[in-house]
């Protein structure tokens, strides 16, 4: 095997590994995990470094995330072994005498780097994420279901973003102060984001509508129950 083929395979493996990490990060995002936390946990799971933070508790609070974490760890273990074995075989089979020029060797490396850098452009990433999310929504038949995105934990409570496909019956055409969210469920709607507009602080007379994104503080399971919002893969244990 010549060095050009060896570098091509090496670059291909880097690109595949990056794509796999992005895919698993998106899957964790669809279970309600914030993007930045999902990426960090996926890298930790795939590499098997065992880096544990308080954020790892987010994976343990959901049966779907625990299941996905197990799959990620097993996949990372098998894939890492495969990569190491392949690289050893490639290095042992390189024929340095057939190297034509340095530029041809760098072509696959540069190509993989350009693709990765290009996908880091915010607009490109947003476009790709929107396509994958639409496909995931269709596959899981969640277009007409309220969804919840866990932003962070604060003690026993949490901050979550609820996207309303439809407003629950008890809250329709009612201002927030008449919904009983604070008095009956100890939930506080902090922000309301209308479609195509910026998020604004929620007021007592704010009215929820289909398509709104609500940023809510309170117990996570209560938020899911009250707003009939479900996670992407399965129910809570």
Image: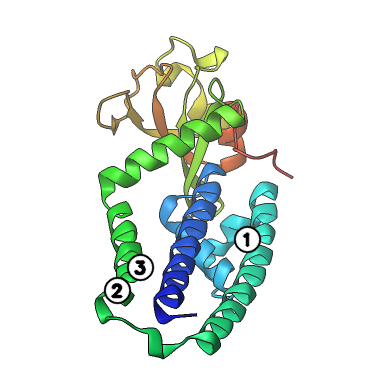
Decide: is 154 above or below 7: above
Tag on residue 108? Answer: 3
Where residue 6 appears, as percent x and y from the top left, is 46, 77
Query: Which residue lies under the disc numbered 1?
Result: 72
Front in this rendered view, residue 84 or 230: 84
**In which image quadrant can residue 56 be found?**
bottom right
Secondary structure beneath dot 2 equals helix
Q: Residue at x 32, y 23 (%)?
A: 195
Instruction: State left or right for residue 157 relative to residue 103.
Output: right
The answer to whether marks 2 and 1 mark residues whose Cβ atoms lie closer than 8 Å is no
Q: Is residue 40 visible?
A: no
Where residue 103 appears, as percent x and y from the top left, is 25, 76
Crowding at label 2, few (<14), some or many (≥20) Cα neighbours within 10 Å? Answer: some
- Of badges 2 and 3, the one in the foreground is 2
Decide: is 81 above or below 207: below
Decide: is 203 above or below 236: above
Secondary structure beneath dot 3 equals helix
Crowding at label 1, few (<14), some or many (≥20) Cα neighbours within 10 Å? Answer: many
Q: Residue at x 47, y 31 (%)?
A: 134
The answer to whether marks 2 and 3 mark residues whose Cβ atoms lie closer than 8 Å is no
Q: How far, Cα to Cα, is label 2 from label 1?
A: 35 Å
Secondary structure beneath dot 1 equals helix
- Of badges 2 and 1, the one in the foreground is 2
Where residue 88 appears, as percent x and y from the top left, is 56, 85
Tag on residue 127? Answer: none
- Of badges 3 and 1, the one in the foreground is 3
Q: How far, Cα to Cα, is label 3 from label 1?
A: 28 Å
Q: Residue at x 70, y 53 (%)?
A: 67
Query: Which residue lies under the disc numbered 2?
Result: 104
**In which image quadrant can residue 72 be found?**
bottom right
First in sequence: mark 2 or mark 1?
Answer: 1
């Amino acid at each position: 095997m010549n060095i050009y083929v060896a570098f091509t395979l090496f670059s291909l493996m880097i690109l595949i590994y990056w794509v796999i990490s992005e895919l698993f990060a998106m899957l964790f995002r669809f279970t309600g995990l914030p993007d930045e936390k999902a990426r960090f946990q996926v890298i930790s799971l795939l590499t098997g470094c065992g880096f544990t933070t308080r954020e790892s508790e987010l994976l343990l609070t959901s049966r779907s995330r625990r299941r996905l974490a197990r799959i990620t760890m097993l996949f990372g273990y098998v894939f890492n072994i495969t990569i190491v074995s392949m690289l050893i075989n490639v290095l042992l089979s390189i024929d340095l005498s057939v190297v034509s020029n340095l530029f041809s060797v760098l072509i696959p490396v540069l190509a993989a780097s350009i693709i990765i850098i290009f996908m880091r452009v915010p607009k490109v990433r947003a476009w790709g994420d929107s396509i994958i999310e639409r496909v995931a929504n269709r596959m899981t038949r969640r277009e007409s279901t309220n969804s919840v995105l866990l932003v962070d934990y604060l003690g026993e409570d949490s901050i979550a973003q609820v996207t309303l496909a439809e407003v629950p019956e008890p809250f329709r055409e009612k201002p927030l102060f008449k919904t009983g969210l604070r008095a009956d469920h100890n939930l506080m709607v902090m922000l309301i984001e209308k479609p195509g507009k910026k998020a604004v602080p929620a007021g007592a007379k704010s009215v929820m509508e289909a398509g709104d994104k609500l940023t809510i503080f309170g117990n996570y399971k209560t938020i899911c129950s009250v707003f009939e919002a479900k996670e992407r893969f399965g129910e809570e244990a």
